[in-house]
Each structure stands twice: as structure tokens, then as C-alpha cells.
């Protein structure tokens, strides 16, 4: 099938544009740092609309040998029905006469599901039992506003008015003391890391350094003197400097060309940096990464062209390179993908799909019972507003990862939540 005459990328979604704008407003300025590296923690007053500061952690104690969770957020609401295709549900092909992925092209098919062909770089992990998919996952109630759904799924505490995310709460349950224990890749603060426990935000590892310190060692002494007070902002700057200094080990780890070639995309570059952080032993245990532009109202395309083929291929190649590049450290790392919601069952007139409900989660790496599809399939309906119904709360998947890999009690991480058994983790 040939693409439409103008296959240009334009999602036409004001809600997603507003969500991205709102996220961009959370970019923090690192007073003492270059490259957009900052520290965050409890909220401050009197410093603009919102500011964040690190408190109470030093670089003295690292935990290089512990488990690591990498949360990869697919921003914009990925189409789980294209990533993991329910080929045995006849409604799928009836509802998607142009966008439906032919059953004959699917990878690793079972009686119900198969993987999009663009995910081929992940097939070795699937066959080795290191990658699994859980379908029909999501929040308990539909929420089709990008920003509101991102907030809700990353707060993960329905009904609570507290401004703290589930990953921040997880940090409070972990024993490590590295200033980089919780690290967000990029220049935006994910809601999941908001809260009382400190975390670190960095755009690129090579740029996480104290500005001017290499040229003039007096810079550090000057900064420490300027921020010697006991105010939250003073502690934030001092700890941001400490975190940037700790990043030195990551900058020195596998500097230059990585052992495994990554895609040149933003995701490929971010996961390359994550591999360096983990292998350096600086004590990072919770790391967040974003991949954007999944809001494909138009030009999702087919197997021959379109944004779905491109994004899925980038996702697969980046994850495959990441686990290969980790080497022996891969035995400590579990990666989970999460998107704010899924897409409608029926394709629209613009080779795309609109906001939906249920979705698919991938779980890869250490401790995964892979090579299988999990979840209870609800069946599809072919009506204009039909969704994938959620049969597995996304927190149930995360609960298994946290309990099996970190040994924590998730009562504090997901307050008031009773998980169901999924079986995806050994």
C-alpha cells in the first residue's frame, strides 16, 4: 500500500502539544552545573512558580552491585494494538483495514498475539526469555488527556493530594545513599520523581560537570563558599555539585565509542548514557528515560511507511543495543515501558488512531519470565469509540518488578492498592 499524498508528521493534537509545553516548563536551571544537570527534592517557596532542591545525601556511599530499574516512558500514548497485535481477534482487522499488521508478518506469534515486524531487534531477547509483553494494561479508569494521564499514572496514588510520584516513594524504601540513586535522563522532571526524596536530572553524561571546574579548581571552593548557608537552595546547590562530581565515574566509563552501536536517535543516545551510568557503579538504582512522538493521530502508516514503523524500530534497536552494551551488568537491570494510555480500536481517516484506554507494557532484562504474552485479553469491539478495556492494572506489573527485584513492600509505593498476580517476574 502506498502512503497518502502528504505523509508529513502532524499529530493535530492540541492536548499533547499542551502536555509537552507543560513538561517543558518543568525544566530546571542548574545554578552550579553545565549541561542541564540539576538536583531536585522537596518543593521550595519564594523561588518562582516551583523549584526543587536535593537534601541529605552525599556521594560517600555507593551501591554499584544492586538491582536497577529503568522506566522507559512512551510519551504521547503508544498504540499497543500495533506493537503487540491481537491477530486472532477478528475485530482487529475489521476495525483497521489499512493499518492492521498482517498476521503473516508478525514476529513470535502465539495463538492470539504477535510482535510488530519493526521490533525484530528484540527477537533474540524474546527467544532467550528476557523480554515479555503484558497486554490490556492501564489505569483503573479512562483518562484521555495526555497531561492529566501522565500526572495520574506517575503519581500512582488515586485520590491523594500529595505531590509525590511513585518512583520517589520507591527511593524512600531503598537503602542506598548515592546522590544519583534516582536519576532522570533529559531536561525535564518526570512526575514519577517528584517528592521528598532527592533525585538527579541530567541531559547528557558528558555534560554533567561543575561549570569551569576543569579550568579553575578554585571554582568549587568559590561555589561552596557562596552557598555555605543552611537554606534549602544552598543545600540543593551543594548536593547538585556533589552529584555532578559523582558523575565523573560515568563519564570515564566506556568513554568514546560504545561496545554496541546505538541508533543516532534521542532514545539511542539516552540509553547509551544510561548504560554508562549503570556500568560505572555510581549507585543509580532508578533511572527514567523518555521516548516521544507516539501521538499518531495521522500518518501512523503501514509496514512500508509511517511513524509507527519508525518509532517501533527505534525503540527496539535502542533497547537491544542497551542490553548488549551493558555486558555483565545486564544481570542487574530490568527495563519497563509505560505509556499514559493506548489508542482507539478503529483507525481514523488520516492513517492514524485517536486517544484510547488500554495498552501494552514490555518488561525486559533481569528476572523476567520472557518469551510470553501476559494479561487477560478482553476482546475488541468495532465501534467509533471502542477501546481496549483494561484487565490488568499497570501497578500490578510494577509491583512484581519491585518486589522481585528490590524486595520492597509496595504498600508505601502504591498506597491503598491491592495488586493482582501477573506472573511476568521470576
Image: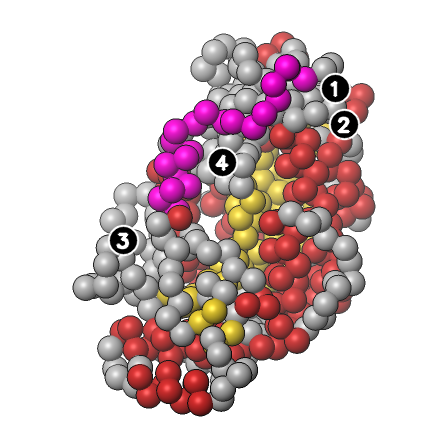
Left or right position of 68 against 109: left
- Give above or below for 3 relative to 410: above
Residue at left 54%, top 12%?
349
| Gap between marks 2 and 3 measured at Cα | 44 Å
Dot 3: element: loop
Q: For the residues carrying marks 4 and 1, which lies nearer the camera in this image? A: 4
Image coordinates for residue 133, horizontal then vertical, percent: 64, 39
Circles 3 and 1: CB distance less than 8 Å? no
Identify the disc placed on residue 203. none
**Few, some or many residues within 10 Å of mark 2 (<14, 14–19, 20+):** many
Which quadrant would residue 106 be assigned to in this image?
top right
Left or right position of 421 against 120: left
Q: Quadrant of the N terminus?
A: top right
Magenta stretch contains residue 116: no
Question: In the image, which residues are magenta?
Answer: 3-23
Q: For the residues carrying marks 2 and 4, which lies nearer the camera in this image? A: 4
Residue with the mark numbered 2: 106
**Few, some or many residues within 10 Å of mark 1 (<14, 14–19, 20+):** some
Residue at left 31%, top 82%?
227
Image coordinates for residue 346, horizontal then vertical, percent: 55, 15
Circles 2 and 4: CB distance less than 8 Å? no
Residue at left 46%, top 63%?
36
Circles 2 and 3: CB distance less than 8 Å? no
Amino acid at each position: 500500500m502506498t502512503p497518502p499524498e502528504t505523509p508529513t508528521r502532524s499529530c493535530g493534537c492540541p492536548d499533547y502539544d499542551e502536555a509537552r509545553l507543560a513538561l517543558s516548563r518543568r525544566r530546571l536551571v542548574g545554578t552550579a552545573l553545565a549541561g542541564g544537570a540539576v538536583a531536585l527534592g522537596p518543593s521550595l517557596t519564594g523561588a518562582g512558580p516551583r523549584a526543587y532542591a536535593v537534601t541529605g545525601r552525599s556521594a560517600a556511599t555507593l551501591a554499584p552491585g544492586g538491582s536497577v530499574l529503568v522506566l522507559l516512558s512512551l510519551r504521547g500514548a503508544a498504540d499497543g494494538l500495533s506493537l503487540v497485535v491481537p491477530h486472532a481477534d477478528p475485530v482487529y482487522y475489521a476495525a483497521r483495514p489499512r493499518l492492521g499488521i498482517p498476521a503473516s508478518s508478525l514476529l513470535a506469534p502465539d495463538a492470539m498475539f504477535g510482535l510488530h515486524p519493526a521490533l525484530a531487534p528484540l527477537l533474540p531477547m524474546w527467544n532467550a526469555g528476557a523480554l515479555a509483553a503484558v497486554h490490556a494494561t492501564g489505569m483503573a479508569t479512562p483518562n484521555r488527556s495526555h497531561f492529566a494521564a501522565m500526572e495520574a499514572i506517575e503519581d500512582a496514588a488515586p485520590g491523594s493530594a500529595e505531590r509525590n510520584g511513585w518512583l520517589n516513594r520507591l527511593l524512600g524504601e531503598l537503602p542506598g545513599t548515592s546522590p544519583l540513586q534516582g536519576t532522570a535522563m533529559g531536561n525535564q522532571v518526570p512526575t514519577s520523581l517528584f517528592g521528598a526524596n532527592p533525585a538527579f536530572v541530567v541531559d547528557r553524561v558528558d555534560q554533567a560537570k561543575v561549570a569551569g571546574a576543569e579550568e579553575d579548581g578554585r571554582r568549587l571552593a568559590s561555589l561552596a563558599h557562596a552557598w555555605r548557608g543552611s537554606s534549602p537552595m544552598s543545600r540543593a546547590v551543594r548536593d547538585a555539585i556533589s552529584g555532578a562530581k559523582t558523575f565523573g565515574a560515568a563519564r570515564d566509563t566506556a568513554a568514546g565509542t560504545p561496545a554496541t552501536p546505538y541508533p543516532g536517535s534521542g532514545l539511542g543516545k539516552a540509553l547509551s548514557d544510561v548504560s554508562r551510568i549503570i556500568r560505572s557503579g555510581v549507585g543509580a538504582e532508578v533511572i527514567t528515560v523518555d521516548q516521544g512522538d507516539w501521538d499518531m493521530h495521522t500518518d501512523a502508516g503501514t509496514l512500508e511507511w509511517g511513524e509507527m514503523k519508525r518509532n517501533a524500530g527505534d525503540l527496539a534497536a535502542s533497547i537491544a543495543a542497551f542490553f548488549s552494551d551493558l555486558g555483565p551488568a545486564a544481570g542487574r537491570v530490568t527495563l519497563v515501558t509505560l505509556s499514559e494510555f493506548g489508542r482507539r480500536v478503529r483507525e481514523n481517516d488520516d492513517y492514524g488512531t485517536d486517544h484510547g484506554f488500554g495498552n501494552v507494557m514490555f518488561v525486559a532484562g533481569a528476572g523476567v519470565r520472557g518469551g510470553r504474552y501476559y494479561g487477560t485479553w478482553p476482546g475488541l469491539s468495532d465501534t467509533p469509540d471502542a477501546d481496549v478495556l483494561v484487565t490488568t492494572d499497570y501497578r500490578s506489573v510494577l509491583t512484581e518488578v519491585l518486589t522481585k527485584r528490590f524486595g520492597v513492600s509496595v504498600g508505601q509505593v502504591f498506597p491503598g492498592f491491592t495488586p493482582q498476580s501477573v506472573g511476568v517476574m521470576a
